[in-house]
Image (tube, rainbow, N blue to C red):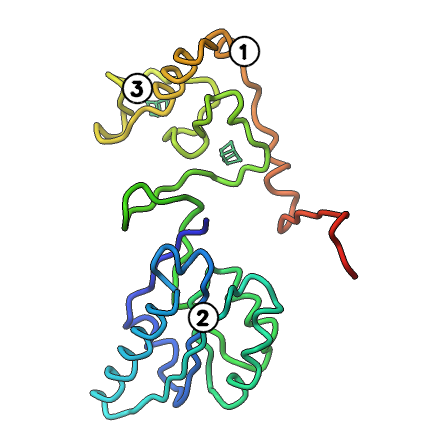
Amino acid sequence: MIIAQQKPIKEIAAMIADCKKVLLAGCQGCVAVCLAGGDKETEILASALRIMRKLEGNPLEAVTYAATRQCDPEYIVPMDDLVKDVDAVISLACGVGVQYVAERYPDKWVVPALDTKFIGGSTVHGVWEEKCGLCGECILHRTGGICPIIRCSKSILNGPCGGSQYGKCEVSKDVDCAWQLIYDRMKALGRLDKMMEIQMPKDWSKSRDGGPRRAVREDVIIE
Ligand code: SF4
Ligand code: SF4
């Protein structure tokens, strides 16, 4: 899922300093799971902004809405009536959601409340780690299900490098060497011979085709 973190409240407040009424649009997708932009976080942010502005003697009217998700235009449509009479929309979605909201309401000031960080998952409650760098050409079948693009500090494809020491990466004793992990896993699987195959440089054109990436499933397209 997409991991995001809320911006400092002062930064968010500065973006809407000249507004009297705003809509805070939460998202119940990934950002709700990582406790950044769901229902609860949206209400808390709205309250905090109201209090802040009241203390400044410049009251703010803040209404809220929780979209099922903002990375799908159909779930933004129900916000139409709420958006009509606000000066700005504060989106608590990832960068995709913010852009969809801005596209739907071209005459509105749309601002992001979150910083979109990475693709990952939780390790323990309240901790998320990056797991995939969206390289466009997955090689996890060659690396025992461990991503060297993200988990190796140098993103090297034929590791380990000379900096690997006692299972740790040379950048920090707190960081596991990804290639040690890959080696251990391949050994346990009885597939160490696979590590002798030289992996050629990645074709990064599959990651960036000179513009925004698209994924198309012809079989489910409904015009
Ligand atoms: S190899 Fe590429 S697609 Fe696969 S997990 Fe790593 S970054 Fe993601
Ligand atoms: S020590 Fe391991 S994780 Fe660190 S850069 Fe070298 S191969 Fe990658």
Q: Give the labeled residue for mark 1.
A: 197
Q: Amino acid at mark 1?
A: Glu
Mark 3 vs 2, N-terminal side: 2
Q: Residues within 10 Å of mark 1 (few under 14, many from 20)?
A: few
| Residue sitting at x 38%, y 86% | 18
Q: Amino acid at mark 3?
A: Gly
Q: Quadrant of residue 114?
A: bottom left
| Dot 2: element | strand
Callout 3 secondary element = loop
| Secondary structure found at label 1 | loop
Report the mark closest to the observer, 3 or 1.
Answer: 1
From the viewer's perspective, tell me whether residue 78 is left or right of residue 50: right
Question: In terms of depth relative to the viewer, which is nearer, 32 or 18?
Answer: 32
Mark 3, Cα crowd under 10 Å, few <14 / some 14-19 / many 20+, is: few
Q: Residue at x 38, y 80 (%)?
A: 16
Q: Which residue is mark 2?
A: 91
Q: Earlier in the sequence, mark 2 or mark 1?
A: 2
What's the residue at 41%, 88% (across, down)?
Answer: 21
User: Whole-Å distance between the Cαs marked 3 and 1?
Assistant: 21 Å
* Relative vertical location of residue 42 with respect to residue 164 in this rendering, above or below: below
* Circle 2: residue type: Ser
**CA distance for labels 2 and 1:** 47 Å
Q: Residue at x 70, y 48 (%)?
A: 216
Q: Position of residue 203 (x, y in %)?
A: 61, 30
Residue 115 rendering spot, x and y as whole percentages: 39, 59
Q: Quadrant of residue 170?
A: top left
Ligand 2 sits in quadrant: top left
The residue carrying mark 3 is 163
Viewport quadrant of the C terminus: bottom right
Q: Is residue 205 left or right of residue 161?
A: right
Q: Determine whether the beta carbon of the residue marked 3 sits less than 8 angstroms from the nearest atom of ligand 2.
A: yes
Measured Cα–Cα span from mark 3 to mark 2: 43 Å
